[in-house]
Image (cartoon, rainbow, N blue to C red):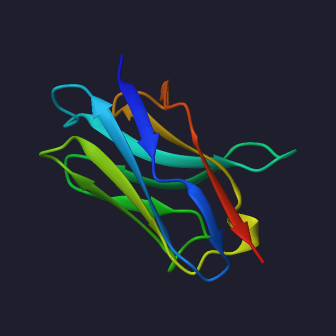
Amino acid sequence: QVQLVESGGGLVQAGGSLRLSCAASIRTLTWFTMGWFRQAPGKEREFVASIRWSDSITAYADSVKGRFTISRDSAKNTVYLQMNSLKPEDTGAYYCAARSNFKDSYDNWGQGTQVTVSS
């Protein structure tokens, strides 16, 4: 089991930036893929971005391509989500997640951090 702790959420005006962090309590994430998901009020949780730890292969939802960047720091076992050009529709609770590369679904989740973008 991987424990995940997010930080970095907050209130920002449209067009602004935020960086989310997710620290993982595991010795190595070599065989894991880390992801960011978000959930707006009244909506289902949706995929935002992911990064495969071993080779840094990334994937993004179409709605955030070109604005968000996922990255990792192996020394700190931390994954980041740099969010630029934020829009009000980016508002929601953002969750960090981890899954083994041998599994199809994410089964380790953080507690979430709130991002609010004002217009």
Residue 88 appearing in the image: yes
Q: Quadrant of residue 29?
A: top left
Task: Say which of 55 and 73 sits in front.
Answer: 73
Check the image and name the residue furthest to the right. 42
Q: Position of residue 5 (x, y in %)?
A: 41, 34
Rendered residue at 70%/43% (across/down): 45
Q: Position of residue 12 (x, y in %)?
A: 62, 70
Check the image and report above or below for 63 versus 43. Answer: below
Task: Say which of 22 and 116 sits in front.
Answer: 116
Check the image and report above or below for 50 versus 27. Answer: below
Position of the N terminus, as image quadrant, is top left
Rendered residue at 58%/63% (across/down): 61
Name the side, left or right, on which 48 lies relative to 63.
left
Q: Position of residue 37 (x, y in %)?
A: 58, 47
Check the image and name the residue furthest to the top. 1
Position of the C terminus, as image quadrant, is bottom right
Check the image and report above or below for 69 versus 4. Answer: below
